[in-house]
Amino acid sequence: MDKLHEMIGRLGDEKQEEPELSDKNTQSQEVRLVDTRNILRARLQRCTSSWDSRNSFEKIPSLDKYWDSAYRIAKQWHPESVECLKLLQPLLQKYRRFQLAVQKPKFDDEEAKIGLNAFLSSAHIQDLRHMYEYGDSNAVEEALDFYFEGLPSFRRKALVDEFLAFKPRRSVRDVPNPLQQDDSEADELDPEELKPEWLAWQTPRHKNLISKMIIGKADKWEIMNEIGDQFYHLRKEIREQYKSNLQEYCIRNVQNLIGQENFNVIRSMYLDTDHIEQLETKFNELVAELPEERQRLLADHYAVFCRKIFRLVNFEPADLTIWLTSAQKMALGQMIQNPNVNDTQIYDKMYEFYMNTTGEQKEEAGDIIESGCRHFIAHMFGDDNAEELEELRLANTVSRQHLAARLATWAREVSDEMDRKRAEGSLSICSRIYLAYDGSCECNGHANECDGMGHECLNCTDNTYGVQCELCMESFTGNPLEGGCVPIEGEETSCTCNGHSEQCDSEGKCQSCLHNTVGDSCERCAPGFHGDATTGTRDDCTRCPCPDGGDCFINEQQLVECVKCPAGKHGITCAEDTAAPKDDASKVSQEETNEKKLNESMKEEGNEGKLIEVGQHQESSNSSIEDNSINERDE
């Protein structure tokens, strides 16, 4: 049976994509439906060829179910195949349109007499006949029915019955190129060629990968998609140098396909900084209204490439883990599901996998993680922060602990809880591999303990402060890297206000504390704010995310939690509606507990969240682009 499916399935590899649907030729529609179906199934098999679980679903008769199953498995276990499967969506939509057309009960008797010869060559029919007579006849019938999947049931039955009756007819397939696309029509679905000077940024590694794809007979759109990926992950300064030609290329081709009016709609949404999902939805609506199938296919293909040129791509945490093998992903998945395994152990194991990788595989894994981390940082915290961190990393002028602390601070300041968790889920791998931070706690001899998630030294002594106790407090001088800090001669040193005030009373108590701080040394955040007031910056204390300016504290999970919620609200930030009010006794008890926690944590601020699970996915989506004036918008 497997041999039969393989033999019939090979037909899909021998065909090219068929031309657009035409209501004038019923015979052409049925043949094109079967051809498109087999092309699509062959490409699905190509996308999943490296999977161990491939055989469990590739024989699903329904192509829609086949694609859905493959895509679901890819998102969980094989993220490297997700983009390949997404590229098949235009072909899947084309197959559905052919299928809908042939299901309509409008064929007259003559049109319905299209025979087996139109679908299979005489040589294939003879091979199948031989296998039917001398092998497994039931398997042959099943394979034929499988091959004609998509046609109405009465048509499949008629074609199988014709095979069983075996009344040979002159084979339409023996006529030279009976229904195949001519070269000019096939060329219409190819992209406009990219000029070599537009790709001068490609490294030898980039070029080698493209060469391998060409040798492997990848189609032109697959190669375009890879070039888009390469450009997307370049450093900003290189992108800035080469982006204009590629953006103009995208603008010209998309505008020609969807029209000036529709293009202006997309351009306006882009300049208004609408969400990627909104841009994608609107673009898909406009493409669906195009009159020709060729236009729709080309628009979809260009969108995949151009959204990367214009950086309209959502960040996927799984982008950082696509270098893992299937076995390694399985091992990490089992650890994630084990309640006795914590996040640190999971990332230690991932780091172990990386360190044990050798040769070209390790180089590739390093490239994936570096480009993925730059993407993650730019997407979550902005291009400017990403470029600043990259420059410091390459210049090696500050410690790795400093860089990791800066990254953790940015993640901690993300206001949306879901976004914050997604950001924190990528911190460990980016800190350990991209920033090369080994997790050590170096405080220049002025502290013995670091914040586990923020990587900052705790309780600096010797009149020092900073991530690594590397700075002297106000009114003190010295070199904390070689010793402590001593009072500046001639200056009053009894007034220590952590940088939040310059006024003290006669007893040295700070007056008029600024930046939302309070205390004799402006060492605490004011009610309704949280943070570490001793850091010495204007942004030490952040407003609590609580209704009516309520107080908050850092709970045991290192999350910001409101001390009390108003009536009808609950949750750590009082954001959820309460179904039924608690009794007064439980309310008082909870409020007293939270008040106690607040008092205990007045000086412990700043770290939120747990690491998210490895391989979590979010739909990355196709979007669209704008004209030359779009370049005025910052990436």
Image: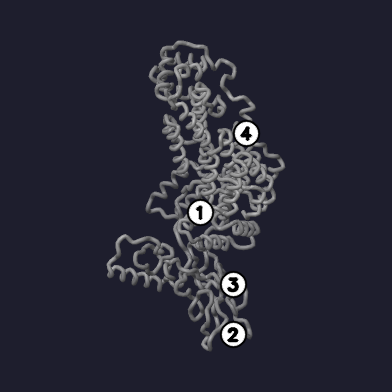
Q: Residue at x 56, y 35 (%)?
A: 291
> Which one is closest to the eye, mark 4 or mark 2?
4
Q: Cα distance, mark 4 to mark 2?
A: 76 Å
Q: Cα distance, mark 3 to mark 1?
A: 29 Å
Question: Disc 4 or 2, which lies upstream in sequence?
Answer: 4
- Residue pointed to by mark 4: 190
Q: Is residue 433 visible?
A: no
Q: Which mark is residue 471?
A: 3
- Residue pointed to by mark 1: 426
Q: Name above or below for residue 631 compared with residue 45.
A: below
* Crowdedness near tag 4: few (<14), some (14–19) or many (≥20) residues, C-alpha within 10 Å: few
Q: Which mark is residue 492?
A: 2
Q: Residue furthest right?
A: 197
User: Quadrant where the N terminus lies?
Assistant: top left
Instruction: Give the left or right position of residue 603, taking residue 300 as reference.
Output: left
Q: Cα distance, mark 4 to mark 3?
A: 60 Å
- Kind of residue at badge 1: Ser
Are the residues tagged 4 and 2 within 8 Å (C-beta)? no
Question: Disc 3 or 2, which lies upstream in sequence?
Answer: 3
